Image (cartoon, grey):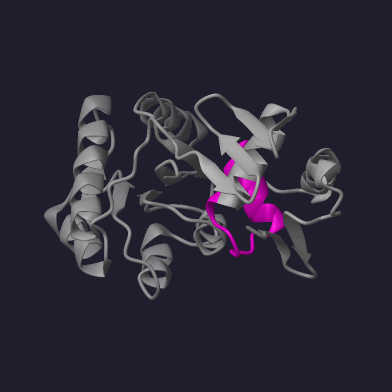
Amino acid sequence: MRDISILIAEDDEEIADLIAILLEKEGYHVIKVTDGQEAVRAVETQLFDLLVLDIMMPKMNGHEVTRLIREQYNMPIIFLSAKTSDFDKVQGLVIGADDYMTKPFTPIELVARVNAQLRRFMKLNQYQPDTENKTCLEYGGLVISPDQHTVTLFGESIELTSKEFDILYLLASHPKKVFSMENIFQQVWGEAHFGSGNTVMVHIRKIRKKLEVDKQKDKWIKTVWGVGYTFNG
């Protein structure tokens, strides 16, 4: 199963970094953005299991972000805000948030609330991801082992770099799903900022070259022109 992913939308870098450190220690995959528009784009391009949203953000505030997200997605949303009145808290919950924390917050409470929301969400959706042991994948002679971080093709070892392995595993975990270059970059590099697709393209090209031992060019990773890449498992 894939790692649990959490999006942090917070324009205060110190607070965002603190939250990221806390959640990464819990084993979660974390991506940070600094404004509301970035938050919406991130949710539209990749899978998240929970969102931590600051209310007062540039370009689009947390309330606006939540209204847009709730039109299509139902993952838990935790608001962060310096506003402490009961009215503000109720308003946030009515808009679509699942929880509301006021600043300053205690780290242990934030982690507890994140864990509680995820447990509730996963139970309701009958989704129990294994965050410690990813599944070994096998497709017609291609074996990808996350525990050993190895790839073999018809019994022959394929030497991949860490990023190459992560890209291949990401694609192979979702066969037939099309990933944009931006999506791949954000999930593998763990960064929301995406400047150029050249980095992803170079890595894809190297993976393909190493997998050509089967003598069928681009058999495993297909290009969907104008969209991105998909695994042909």
- In the image shown, does 12 or 131 lie closer to the viewer? 131
Residue found 23% across the figure and 43% down from its top: 101
Q: Quadrant of residue 93?
A: bottom left
Image coords of residue 155 (percent x, y) = 68, 33
On the question of residue 49 being in view, the answer is yes
Note whether residue 199 is visible: no
Which residues make up the magenta segment?
Answer: 173-189
The residue lying toward the viewer, choosing from 41 and 61, is 41
185 part of magenta stretch: yes
Image position, residue 19 (x, y; %):
39, 32
Residue extending farthest to the bottom is 71
Left or right: 87 in relation to 210 = left
Compared with 109, 113 (above or below) is below
Q: Give the left or right position of residue 10, taking residue 120 as reference.
A: right
Residue 111 x %, y %: 26, 32
What residue do we see at 45% from left, 40% from top?
A: 135
Relative to 94, 23 lies left or right:
right
Q: Is residue 210 above or below residue 61?
A: above
Q: Nearer the viewer, residue 127 or 119?
A: 127
- Tell me if residue 39 comes above or below residue 18 in the rendering: below
The number of discs equals 0
Instruction: Please tell me whether residue 209 is drawn above or below residue 62 in the rendered image.
Output: above
What residue is rendered at 73% in x and 55% in y? 221
